Image (cartoon, rainbow, N blue to C red):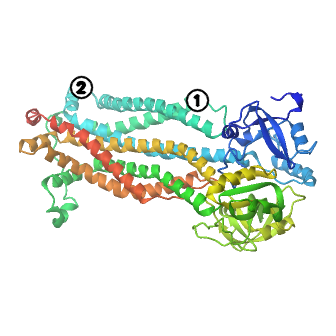
Amino acid sequence: MFDKYPKLGAVEVLINRQFAEAHKLKPGMDLDVAAEGKRKVLTIVGIAASPEFVYTVRDAAGLLEDPSTFGAAIMPENQIQELMGRKGSVNQVLIRFAPGAQKEEIVQKIKEILQPYGLLAEYPQKDQLSEAILRGELTQLRAFSRFLPTIFLAIALLMQFVFVGRLVKTQRGQIGLLKALGYSNISLLFLYGSYAFLATTIGALVGIALGYGLASLLVRLYAIFFNLPRLEETLRLGTAGAVAFLSITAGTTAGLAAAWGITSIRPAESMRPTFPKATKRSFLERIPILWNHLGLQWRMSFRSLSRSRFRAFVTAMGAIFSIALLVVSLFSKDSMDDLMRRHFSYDRQYDYLVRIISPVKEGEILNISRIDGVLEAEPFLELPVRIKLGRKNREDVLLAMEPSPSLVRITNQEGKELPLPEEGLLLDWFTAQKLEAKVGDELQVQSMLDLGPPRYGIFRVEGITKRAMGSASMVSLKEANRLLNEQNVVSGVMLKIDPGLSDKVERELERMVNISSVLNKKDERAYFQKNLGYMYYSIGILVLFSSVLGFAIIYNSSVIALSERKRTLAALKALGMTNQEVAVYLWGEDGFLLFWGIILGLPLGKVLSELYAVAVSTDLFSFNVIIYKSTYFLAACGGIVLGIFAWILALKGVKELKMIEILKAND
């Protein structure tokens, strides 16, 4: 990987892919870095990935770190020690436990050994930031994989039940004839159960193939988004077999349950048409003012619904869940738009965030505020800390600023602006949850900054803050310096600049060797929007599935209604009704059910969105359920368009009705 004796004393380095792509760097090129206040030249010898940086981010306070401003590098130990002027030094120890080891006892002993050397932090692998982000993403996928299939499987089983049940009813005469010829109930149940088995088996196999194709594409997207060079898609036969078994078993069971009516069919009775069901007056018929103003076709539609209540229930449930899933599909875009608005336009009023290599006195960064084009500058101090309440503790980032900052807005969980107190701290909402802390509690805060021995302080919780993205508690610069036993120490500065002089400001900042990174809010936003392509891909798949579900439900309902009423429709046409009038009669049923599907599906979509948001929330990222009125409008319009399209396709059968053949006696 590295040459044992590099030519001409070159300092070799491997860099991560995202950083290399952002700066168009390739092996063999030189990379200038600032170390110990001086410029040093490194030679890039390859592109590599590290398990600690599958998602390259500095800390939990900046989850959207632009790869052009922060990257990960791998160097030989002796070279980096020499580069930093710390020969023989290390600042991190990785531990692997033997199977069956007493982990807690070993960790305690390691702490005792390292404490004299300034032990700042220790954490298990699952809490390592990069892994925590990846685990959070996998948690979202796990919730997604349980959420959608459950709904689709339930609706598919109801459709299977209705379809097989209708098939048995329409073939009642043939079933009676087969019974008269000696076929048993078991053989006939096997026949109709095999229909369900065959349909479900074909659906399961096609679904597994399509699922594998979509999963392969998703894996490639994840390999690009996360730095995972060996991520490969594989078809796990155990998982595929479990999916096929569940689908086929459930589908076949639904078909057999629907075909159970075969056992009650008698050969002699099956040779004549079934008697019409005795029905009571529908709800609308009991409202004369409304009922008397309905046309003939609409009255017939409502009476038909009252006679086929189960089929109407299945169709309505399908429409409701289809509309709800459209809302769920689109709400994430609304929530992300709101998050971007709050994070980039409301919470952060600065244009540039400049970080210094190591904390310095506030007066030493005055030259940055004097750059031509800088309109406003506010210093800050980022301080890694461990916050403790009782027996519970959590590592967090303490962001210190001057009271009443103008370039950063601080908000609580309700989105209301909070003032930054001169004393005490504003605790991050997630840290507050983990510690079960509330306003008024006194917390022990331990500094984990690599500046001398750890420092401790007691801070009173003055409020709970929630950032749009990332995690950080807030204090005044005075309080943060009190914790460090220092005065006027800062680690960076926020800048508001003249838009016309941004290039000049960036060039001036690049010349300064004591700056570790310059975060351009405009570039960060562009990087974030670029990564939204992965989210839009997921939204597109969900919208497609929701649309197919709604179309299939309404089309299936229309076809079944047409097959059930062939004689009725043919009689209506014989009495002088046009195809358009017959179509209105059929549309009355579907339109009424679709109407209630929209009315009930929209609020259900919001409820499902809230449940989904809770399921995918992680320690570092949480969704606020924001649904714009336009999303409700689009979901409703999508349902109407799908309903009309399915209805138009189903109505082709109306024109093909042959009245003479249908109306002739069955005797």
Write the residue at 19% across / 57% down: 280
Q: Position of residue 517 (x, y in %)?
A: 74, 51
* Circle 2: element type: loop
Most extreme residue toward the top is 181
* Amino acid type at mark 2: Gly
Q: In the rendered view of the protein, which quadrant contains the C terminus?
A: top left
Q: In the rendered view of the protein, which quadrant contains the N terminus?
A: top right
* Amino acid type at mark 1: Thr
Nearest the eye: 583 or 20 = 20
Say whether residue 329 is visible.
Answer: yes
State which quadrant residue 551 falls in. top left
Q: Position of residue 484 (x, y in %)?
A: 85, 64
**Comes first in the chain, label 1 or label 2:** 2
Write the residue at 64% across / 60% down: 498
* Left/right of residue 210 with respect to residue 98 in the rendered view: left
Nearest the eye: 70 or 224 = 70
* Left/right of residue 82 with respect to residue 235 in the rendered view: right
Judge the density around disc 1: few (<14), some (14-19), many (≥20) Cα neighbours within 10 Å: few
Vertical side of 56 occupied by 350: above or below: below
| Residue assigned mark 2 | 182
Q: Position of residue 500 (x, y in %)?
A: 62, 56
- The numbered mark at residue 234 is 1
